[in-house]
Amino acid sequence: MIIGALQKKKPKEPELVSGPIYNYEEFDELVNYYPYGYPAGIPTNQYTRTTVTSLDALRESSLPFDEPALIYDYIKVRKELDKDELKSFTDPIVERYCKMVNAPVPEYGFWRQTRYDGEKVIRNDIETNEIESRTFSVYQYEDMYRISFYVSGSRYTIEDCKLALDGISIQADQRKSDEVLKQDLEPIKEKLFELFGVEFSDVNILRSYNEYDKTKLDHLYVTFYNNADHELNDNLSSLSDSITLSFDNTKHSSIDTTSDTILYNVSISYKKYRSEPYERCYATKKVELLDLKIAEEYLSKGYVIGGYGCPICTASQEKIDFEDYDIVCIRYRVCKNVVIPFYNFYKHIEGNTYAMTSVPAIEISGYAEHFEKAAAEHDHKMQ
């Protein structure tokens, strides 16, 4: 079994740790690194709009409430960059892609760059990355490879967006259920496996809706991966190799139109890590879960972690009362260099769209005191 082979790489089984393993200052530093919601300065009901297939699916993928939880270390396994290694990864994929779309293989080179965070990267030459109407980009990071094919630019026609591999069209009818969509994508799935020289057994579909035009689908993501490659794969974005189809339905200008039916504007991206999943994310501690009643008390007082990185967006949100939430699940979240369980509280808004806010599912010393102090200082300033 794959998972058994990978488990040999795991450290020894973590022992149970009693009491809090973080104080609020440490926790605040960890969570503020995460861009999709962080502790508020004062008690609030901030939340993130999220779309779920069903509440049953959330329940099925949630952690059990009556068992200790694991804390994971999340690290990048950095390796030296190697241009020849990147070329041997890229060339066969580009050749197969060009054959599938009946286009000549372009000449392209590679160049090195250093990102803002200091990580070194090799990527393909930006001036020679066109294949017909599509752009392709190739990156070798210190921890993984990524190759993508997509329509570039802010303006394009529906015809520009249509793509077929060996005559099989890549499209998604957003009106269909996830299960029907998966069936529709079976033929192109096999072509994708042929293109990248891999096979994956599982598929995940995620729908993203515009915060301002709440009835319109922004993006539809279809990810092929092996769920068994890591025990957190179903709780986080895939921690192992994967292929993702990203269908874009976003307006780029006032004359653009969004679709209510079939989506064609798709980018194809293949992510391949340079190390095994259990080398990058492994359990280090086992802790008792915070009592749900305490988490609900934090929720009622607004001691939550949610909302958006932009304070204006958070302040302009429609207010949601989470007192009678619809469901609570235990889900993991990457916070800087650790992975921590949270109680995610969901409140129905419309359709399959829910407001979601979080409370840490482990004991954090000074957590409530931080909010109480911030609230007192805020009230004093307002007097």
Image: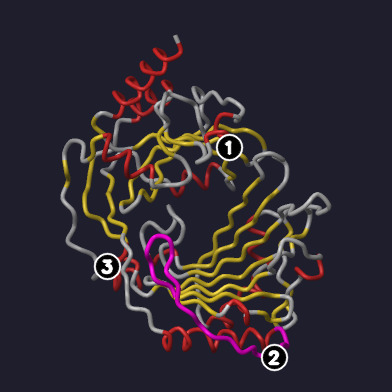
Q: Which quarter of the rendered picture does the C terminus lie within?
A: top left
Upstream in the sequence, badge 1 or badge 3?
A: 3
Residue with the most extreme right position:
255
Pointers 2 and 1 in contact (C-beta within 8 Å):
no
Q: CA distance from mark 2 to mark 1?
A: 46 Å
Residue with the most extreme top position:
383
Residue at 66% across / 68% down in the picture?
Answer: 185
Q: CA distance from mark 1 to mark 3?
A: 36 Å
Pick the front one: 253 or 286? 253
Query: Which residue was labeled with disc 2?
Result: 104
Give me the disc on residue 354. Answer: 1
Residue at 66% across / 35% down in the picture?
Answer: 350
Q: Amino acid at mark 2?
A: Pro
Judge depth for marks 2 and 3 and give the one in front.
2
Per the picture, the main secondary structure of the magenta-coloured stretch is: loop
Upstream in the sequence, badge 2 or badge 1?
A: 2
Q: Amino acid at mark 1?
A: Tyr
Q: Is residue 333 above or below residue 292?
A: below
On the image, which quarter does residue 19 sit in?
top left
Q: Give the left or right position of residue 262, taking residue 4 as reference.
A: right
Query: Which residue was labeled with disc 3?
Result: 7
